[in-house]
Amino acid sequence: MAQQKIFGYANRISVRPGDEISFHVNCDGASEADAQLVRLIHGDTHEAGPGHVEVELESPVNGRWAVKKQYTQLGSFLKVFDPENKLAVSGSFSLAAFIWPTLPQRGSRQTILGRWDTVRNIGYALGINPAGHLEFWVGNGSEVDCVTAELPLLAKVWYLVGVSYDRESGRAQLYQEGVLNRYNSLVGKVVPYDFASHVVQHFRFRPENGADVPFLLAGARDEHALRGPFVSDLFAGKIDRPAICGRVLTRAEFDVCRGGGLLPEDAVLAFWDTSKGYSAQGVSHHVIDGGPHRLNARGVNHPVRAMTGWNWNGKDDCFRIDPSQFGGIEFHPDAVTDCGWEATKSMIVPTDLKSGIYAVRLRVGPGIGIAEEYIVFVVRPAKPTAKLCFLVPSASYLAYANESLSFDAQIIQPMTGQPPVVTDLDVETYEHREYGLSTYDHYEDDAGVCFSSYLRPIINMRPKYRMSSMNITWQFPADLSVVAWIDHMGYDCDFITDEDLHREGVDLLRPYFCVMTGTHPEYVSERMLDAQEDYVADGGRLIYMGGNGYYWVVGFDPENPACMEVRKLDSGMRAWAAKPGEHYLQTTGEKSGLWRNRGRAPQKLTGVGFIAEGFETSAPYRKMPDAWHRTVSWITEGMEGEIIGDRGLAYNAAAGVELDRYDLSLGTPPHTKIIASSGGHSDNYVLVTEELLYAYAGLTGSIDYRIRADMTFFTASNDGAVFSTGSIAFGQALPANGFDNSASRLLTNVVNAFLKPGALPGSYWTVEEKQWR
Amino acid sequence: MAYTEDDSRPDKDVHVRDHFDRMTRAYLRSVLSDEVIEEHRTGDVGNPSEPLSRLLAWCQRRPLTEQYAVKAEADGTFRLVSFSGRRGQPPRYVGDERYATIREARHGAFLRHISDLTEK
């Protein structure tokens, strides 16, 4: 019997009572699964905490679900909308495109453009053969003829490639010329390499055109008996301004194009002007055909736009300056942003379902490991009812979705200082890559992953999961420790997500006295940041429960809010670096990278910002002199001694993993108090790169005093306030010792004060007294 | 390969890395001792001694395919694996040992590195 495994996702991450949500499940080795609706309370199995805690709920979705094998279309490509088959050309034709191949030696066929059926050998296409040479091929249903360039293509170099095919004579001539300039390619003009090829071949027969074969860019039609039609022969790299002409183009006409001129207008059947469609707000997935038939194309699995094109001059660093230099669209054979599975089940969210974090738990066979799945979703309140709100950092969950650093990143062991601890689930996901990558991973061609969506199984957005490289909970399962604390303390709390906040802005926060974040709200859109800043400025109270928050500038796809985009660049602790000229989000038009580099360091909102990361160990905080200040002494009221957070589920203390620091030079509000601070961390803790001007020895925990978590507090107008823990591990410290610990007691003081209307404790002191030190 | 005309590796950086690694290994063998191994067995986190720090730095910075990881087994034990270095290719088991705890398994990985270092 096949190994039993089950994976799934929901079409929405956040729902209200009365909304419909659908669940999409792929199962191997079983035709039925046991389904159970659960409310998730705690997700860390660490022995120092309460373990995994869930509450089973009555629901019509409970019971046996019919499940089956579902297939995923891997790879990004463009599908041309050609309902009248205008591109099923019956006469002579030519194909042309600028390309920047990244894996010409991939060892498999790659299609640049064409109307080709790989199963029936019907049609025509221009592409790269498995040996890395430009090739044009045609098929009549039984045979394939081709013409192949004599020189292999060089990776990450721009070329103009094309073919002229004379149907009458069968003559096919390739056109391959390098179009390197001083900036646009990996290598420059000093490389004595011959980029040109103009091979001629006479074909033995004429191509057939299948009525059901789509014209694709960066892929070709394939079919499987069980799966049905799909796209294979995927291209890795960039394509710029591809075109098809309805006659033979001369070499001189191609040369005009190579010089920046246009193809002859009377010959063009379709010309996808990939540099068109830009606005100050980015560019969509639609690629505009400037030809006579308006055969626009649409991206599948998010081909990456806002990328430099063949004619990028190295000076204009944003498409807003001159979109004509940004016609490159980047394709990846291993990209996936929507598994596109059939819905297995749907559910109307019951009207009496309390706001919280829920999942449909699915089990087959042994019901553990890869035979168990939790499809997680957040239920918002129908109307805000609680005073407390937990902001689920769903954007950050997307950023880390299915990260596989332990398997692919040589650097992860030096970072964590320990060998990873992998599970069957990690190995399964790594071996079968159809569930996609995180923004911490690289595509096969080494490009960083800039899109991530929840329309696919996310194995680390579930309870019990431990991040293999660090062997602690991370993001979603770590945040459940905060959720469990809220539950244990009996606070009435509403739950909302980043997606909700991005869409609805500050109005979503206004009903609440206090908003709590997750442990690592690292990825933030401008609307999310604006909303939280306005909330605090208008009198809201924010508890920043984590470390390394409010860090990356992200955008959400306006056409598909399940998908987030980030570009990593310039500085910051980053898994990859966007290439020059590719620093702006296609989804919003904004410059991505760190908020700090756009004048909005996290310190300006929270008082603290990222300073160091380390693993293996955490440390407690010690009270700082401000803790006894009469305006804030209520925060540590009832706490004996100076130590706070000396136990926890993330390396046994509350200050650890990723740490934030108070820094007036980065915008910490001047009246901020440092309540407590950690320090003396191990040398596995290192200073973040954005702090570096010059690197020098000793930028580590036991040597550099800046490496610490600062617990801070400041007041804002209208009784507003911000309390920050400055540490990821703080949230995981809360459940220790049955929630009876100093971190828990301190947070209770803060939440209780924040949930009371009117002035905060300590705010009755006069201005002069507040300045007392 | 320092004195041969080896042109089989297109990235010449590996020649330099190999040279550096030979120097590092020679130094590490000179500081390796039973005491250092015992130090690792009893506690390998925090700020270890200088010799152990140097050894761990070498272990952790080896090429991905020469690193070891711990695999949590369904029966609650732990085994050692090494990574393929090829995308989508699963890790392979290293040895038959089963460890009762993660800490013991990580020490097992350390001993594997030491064995690689000393070629014993």
Image (cartoon, grey):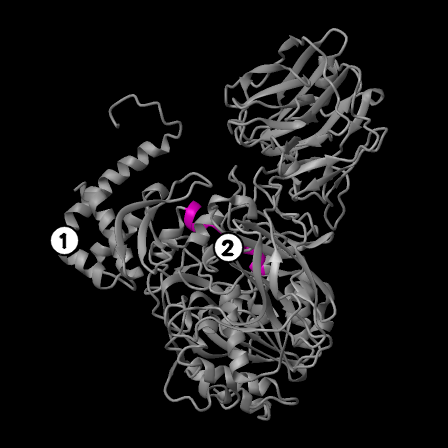
SS for callout 1: loop
Identify the amino acid type marked 1: Ser
Is residue A405 a member of the stretch shown in magenta?
Answer: yes
Relative to residue B64, is residue A238 drawn left or right? right
Residue nearest the viewer, comparing A282 with A493: A493
**C-alpha gap between disc 2 and disc 1:** 39 Å
**Residue lying at 31% horizontally and 23% vertically, measured from the top left:** B6
Residue A751 vertical position relative to residue A291 in the rendered view, above or below? below
Same chain, marks 2 and 1?
no
Across and down, in percent, residue A628 comes to 45, 88
Say few, some or many: other residues with alpha carbon within 10 Å of mark 2 (under 14 / 14 to 19 / 20 or more). many
Relative to residue A692, is residue A560 drawn left or right? right
Across and down, in percent, residue A293 comes to 85, 30
Q: Chain of mark 1?
A: B
Which quadrant of the figure has residue A40? bottom right
Across and down, in percent, residue A23 comes to 65, 58
Q: Which residues are magenta?
A: A396-409
Identify the amino acid type marked 2: Gly
Residue nearest the viewer, comparing B118 with A706: B118
Comparing labels 2 and 1, the label whose residue is closer to the camera? 1
Instruction: Using the rendered image of the protein, determine whether residue A253 is visible from the camera's viewpoint.
Output: yes
Across and down, in percent, residue A322 comes to 72, 39
Q: Chain of mark 2?
A: A
Residue nearest the viewer, comparing B80 with A751: B80
Which quadrant of the figure has residue A198? top right
Say few, some or many: other residues with alpha carbon within 10 Å of mark 1 (under 14 / 14 to 19 / 20 or more). few
| Residue occupied by mark 2 | A572
| Residue occupied by mark 1 | B33
Query: Could you say which disc has been placed on residue A705 in the image?
Result: none
Instruction: Using the rendered image of the protein, determine whether residue A402 is visible from the camera's viewpoint.
Output: no
Is residue A723 a member of the stretch shown in magenta?
Answer: no
Residue A308 vertical position relative to residue A642 in the rendered view, above or below? above
